[in-house]
Image (cartoon, rainbow, N blue to C red):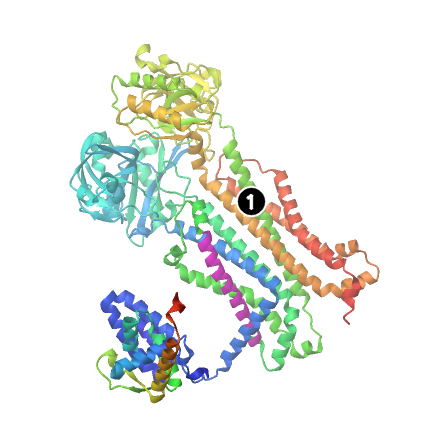
Amino acid sequence: MKGTNLGELEEIVLLVVANLYDEAYGVAIKLEIEEKCNRKITISTVHNVLQRLQEKNFLESRYSEPTKERGGKRKLLFKVTKSGQAALVNSRTMRESLWKGVTELAFE
Amino acid sequence: MLRRLTDWLLQRYCNQQLYEAISGDLEELYELDVNAHGQRRAGRHYLSNSISFLWYHRLRKKTITKTNNNMSLVKNYFKVSVRDLIRHKMYTSINLIGLVSAITVALMILQYVVYETGFDRFHADYDRIYRVVNDRYQKGELIQHGTITYPTIGPTMAKDFPEVEAYTRMTFNSRNYIGFEDDLHLTEQFLFADEHFLDFFSFDLLHGNIKTALDEPYEAVLTESFARKILESDPAELVGKSIEIYSTPTKVTGIVADPPAQSHLQFDMLLSYNTFVAMSGDGADTSWDWSDFYHYVKLKENLDLEGLASKLEEFGVKYFKEGEVSGSVEKFRLQSLSETHFDPTMQYEFGQIVNGRIVWTLLVIAGFILVIAWINYINLTTSRVLQRAKEVGVRKSVGANKSHIAFQFVVETLIVNTLGLVASIALVWLLQPYFNQLTELDLDLSILWTSELFAIPFPLLFLLLFTISLIVLSIYPATLLAGFKAKDVINGKYKIKGRVAWLRKGLVAFQFITAIALINGALAISDQVDYILNKDLGLDIDNTLVVYGPAMTDWDSTFFSKIDRFQNEIKRLPNVKNIATSNRIAGSRMGKLFQVRNNDKPDAENLSLNWMGIGYNFEQLYDLEIIEGRALEQIDYNYSFNGGLIYNLLINRSAVEYLGFDSVSEAIGGVLTIYRRQWRIVGVVEDFHQMTLHEKIEPLVLQPFRDTQDSYSIKLEGKGNDLLLADIEQLYSSVFPGNYFDYFYLTDNYRRHYQPEIRLSAISKVFTVLSIVMVILGLYGLTTMTLEKKVKEIGIRKVLGAKVGQLLVHLTKDFALLMLLALLIGIPLSIYFIDLWKADFAYAAELGVSSVVLACLLILAFTSLPILLQTRRIASDNPIKALRDE
């Protein structure tokens, strides 16, 4: 089923959310991706992917307490759910098993 | 402001649960951006980021907006209109092509018109600044209508008239050399401007003191780009330094920004007026009969201009005593800055001038082309009214009222016009380089947004025009359609009334008349341009190279021998036929003598004649015809030989009668007193055109004359080439070291004077072709649609035995009548306008009857061809096809 698979960007975002743990919100995720993956990404794309992951139940979100920064607006913090974790693990084991089957000769 | 607006957009259209998070994120990014890239870039990012949110449907508001019935109606109109436009491709494309061409032309012409009308508006007191201009009369006849007056005029007006708040006076010089350190630099035009000049006008003084910069003799203010030519590094460093002009050290007291392109006053440099007084004597300050000076006055606000005009009349009488002071009766007038740029009739003009009539003509023609496009639109739309009637009927029976139906057609017109406008803007953008080449101006669309026309800001005017065009285009088809009764339509009993057909015919006739006028106009203009470029001027200007005189060489005892040496050496070059000096060059303005008397008529008044100082051989070089007496000889140039009492000169044929001689032969031997000196007439030359064909041939005196500033006319065998020019330049610099070698071809000089007409001719040809194409397209569309409705009629007629030829006559006779009517009105109308235009020329080509007839035949052929073809196609179809359906 299409809905439960992870796209490449989805996987990255999911991993970054896991990386940032308690500080995973839009801007932080964007900056982290730009720094770690060395690619440009717009904030709207980040939010779109986050929504998609939430629809798939891989993420859950809550609003933080308001602070004085950001014009007093609250941050929407994301957290990986159990099924999100499962999807990540799943994707990783799938890749590893595929890697195992690759002989070095294949790249020559 | 922009950020608040975008935030509001987000709040309105964004998913409500996400709005706070997103808006917070945007805020945070904005602050990061401000620190990294500055406010402007951050603002741009903020905008593009916010808008990109609306792209994703996941992030947009989930709930459906409350349905607004009117909104959905408009949406439906929109949808139906677009479908209809797509379905009728021919109709849509004819309308669009017409509208796009017309709007494109209009936008381009408007750029030009707005550019010209924007002249001099940068002056703070634009509305209150006037130039003093002056008419001179002798024997009750106007002898000069010019911009130059006497040095005393400005100061005296300021003293006599309380209405005058400020004045400035100036005189100008062109082509001179500035020395700085070891280099010479050419100035094309500079002004001797008095101490009020900088304060009076609003030229931007970058360095120096606006009050004192032009006070003392030998002070100069340079324009920024001229200063940069002299000292590349930093113009400001020139301030306080000394430059050399007329071999006199002159102090640079300021740097002024270059005069804006839209300034009728153009200069490289301002020298203090007192420099001119110091060089030429007190007469430059106090004279009442030396007229080389320009005055501008600034009037107090809200004045009675009529009253002032009559005071000026008295002023002329009071100071000039009916001709006793300066030799002529003087009348003064104030010319507002808004007139100045558009008046080409002024003599001794030194500002940037266009012919206002040409500018307005172009605007009117652009308007007519727009009207042709509109007529196409209206005619095609009304002729399709019946096709749309069913749609209207259905709409009405489900409850639409008149205004609903009308509104739908407004929407449809809006769509077509907006499309047309967008396409036009793109087209203008594409064609701009060609247009700029044609106008020799650096224009683009942006000039429209910042300008005003008829004292209305242009964007507002444009909006107004667009709205008017919407109303004009939609109101008639809309009311026509809205008038159908639902019941009739559904019963199939509907038709349009006779009025519509008449209106349509009237509009088509109007298009024809416009097309006829345009094509005749374009032909006449092109005839006239041919005429002025090819007319026999009475002197031979072909293959004539003119080299500017060695103005930097001192006038001393060796100068004559230098001229002779130079001329002899040049004559030895291959391909050179002849060489002669002259003080004035044909095609440019002549000098003027104001106090000439014929000694045979001792009690006659002073007369004014044009003057040209010529060197030996001039008559031969230009192939002037000597009709009586002889040409000037070497001996005439050596004034001391004949005792220094009477000198010899030539006059032209027009001068014979003007000076009071009964015949050409009587003039020979006659003696003239010119400024208290005696001159004997030894020859009369046939009249030749001293200036362009805009000007009449004037009575002219040709005096033997030699001066350092005289130009050298060199007659060549065929066209000149680089090698020859290099030889001439080398000789020039060896005989006249320290001078700047510069030259032009005489034919180019004439051509330059005719540039506006040549340009107008090119533009009018484009206009004419465009308008004819539009008329043809419109007619093609119209006939196609009318014939479609007559297919059955034609079928029946054929079945009953009508021949194709008979059908053709029957179907096109209305059109032929229309065409005839248009010719009857169009031809006299176009002749009238052409005569108006030709008034600009003292010498104009006869309006050829053959060209008018040809033009009309052309139009007739072009327009009837598509109609005949289309009609023939339908008329020769098998009638079965037309009648089988039922």
Q: Position of residue B722 (x, y in %)?
A: 39, 28
Q: Residue at x 26, y 69 (%)?
A: B33
Please check the rendered image and state whether residue B596 is part of the magenta-colored stretch, yes or no: no
Q: Which element carries disc 1, helix, strand or loop?
A: helix
User: In the displayed structure, would residue B434 be above or below residue A27?
Assistant: above
User: What residue is disc 1 on?
Assistant: B521
Q: Position of residue B643 (x, y in %)?
A: 31, 10
For the C terminus of chain B, the image quarter is bottom right
Q: Residue at x 55, y 38 (%)?
A: B527
Q: Position of residue A83 (x, y in %)?
A: 36, 88
As rendered, which of B587 and B561 lies closer to the eye? B561
Tell me if residue B224 can be seen: yes
**Image quadrant assignment for residue B399:** bottom right
**Image quadrant assignment for residue B610:** top left
Per the picture, the main secondary structure of the magenta-coloured stretch is: helix
User: In the displayed structure, would residue B851 be above or below residue B100?
Assistant: above
- From which residue to which does the magenta span run? B404-431
Q: Position of residue A2 (x, y in %)?
A: 45, 82
Q: Residue at x 39, y 73 (%)?
A: A102
As rendered, which of B418 and B523 lies closer to the eye? B418
Q: Is residue B706 left or right of residue B469?
A: left
